[in-house]
Image (cartoon, grey):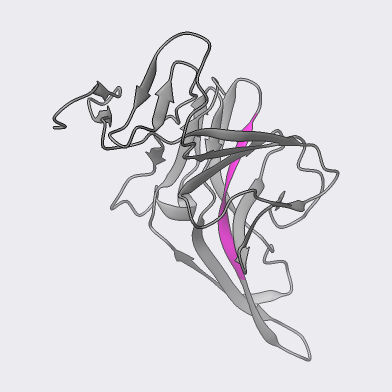
Amino acid sequence: MATWGALFTDQYGNPWITPDTTPMCLVQKVVLTPSTGETYNLPVNSSSPFIIACHATVNNVIFFINKVGSTYTLSYQVAGIGGSPGAVTIYIFGYVIPQPLPKWGVAIWNAAGQCILTNETKVMNPPVGYGTIGSTTDIGYLVDKTVSGKWAVLPRVMGIVTGVYSGSQARPYSSPIDTLAYYDGNSTRLSAGTRVAPGGSIINVGYANSRDQIFAIEVSRY
């Protein structure tokens, strides 16, 4: 327990903010309407922690992040086949220090004299894990949940599929299995899909499961 200041708890009863911690908040919300799968250079850097969450208005749109040099890039595409991903919404959460002061309301400073929270700060909702740890049917790329409301998934690799291209020049095939979030206006499907689908020319197909949960953030208030 901190020696002075304010203490809040979240809906799970966990300490939410003390003078010695800083809440992650919404830094930027980006809405894209591409005609096909594309990439977006994220305005972030490794010097400060950040969390990316996404959803699309077309089913089976996967999200994955790459880092080249100091640049982080978010890619999005309809799993395996391509096509229009509809409207893609990206939420960027991180630390904003100091927070801009409101004209009136509540403001909280840390022990270093930096404003870390005000009544206008859009604090990040806690990520929720979907999937059953220890399950053989409801974990990793096998998770497929439809939840009420607007949720954004955290991009992560949930497994990998491998095989061999058949034909006169056989060669290896592999594709990561990434997270997806499909928001239809009322509910959100959280699942996973492959970047490159194992078509009919692939033989000896095998799957490896990360056995991790899919994490998502409820984003209706952002």
Q: Nearer the viewer, residue 217 or 124?
A: 124
Of the 4 image quadrants, the one containing the N terminus is top left
The reply, left or right, for residue 17 in relation to residue 157 is left
**Farthest front residue in view:** 113
Q: Nearer the viewer, residue 23 or 112?
A: 112
Give residue 52's quadrant in the image: top right
**In the picture shown, does residue 215 fall above or below 183?**
below
* Percent coordinates x, y for residue 151 in the rendering: 53, 31
**In the picture shown, does residue 222 fall above or below 169?**
above
**Farthest bottom residue in view:** 168
Q: Nearer the viewer, residue 221 or 150?
A: 221
Give residue 4's quadrant in the image: top left
The reply, left or right, for residue 147 in relation to residue 91 is left
Residue at x 41%, y 25% (from the top left corner)? 117
Number of residue marks = 0
**In the picture shown, does residue 93 fall above or below 36?**
above
* Percent coordinates x, y for residue 71 in the rendering: 64, 61
Confirm whether the magenta stretch covers residue 168: no
| Magenta-colored span | 175-183
The reply, left or right, for residue 153 in relation to residue 22 is right
Give residue 204's quadrant in the image: bottom right
**In the picture shown, does residue 222 fall above or below 154?**
above
Residue at x 44%, y 15% (from the top left corner)? 119
* Percent coordinates x, y for residue 62 in the rendering: 64, 49
* Percent coordinates x, y for residue 9 in the rendering: 26, 23
Of the 4 image quadrants, the one containing the C terminus is top right
Residue at x 49%, y 56% (from the top left corner)? 47
Query: Mostly what secondary structure, the magenta segment?
Result: strand
**Farthest right residue in view:** 35
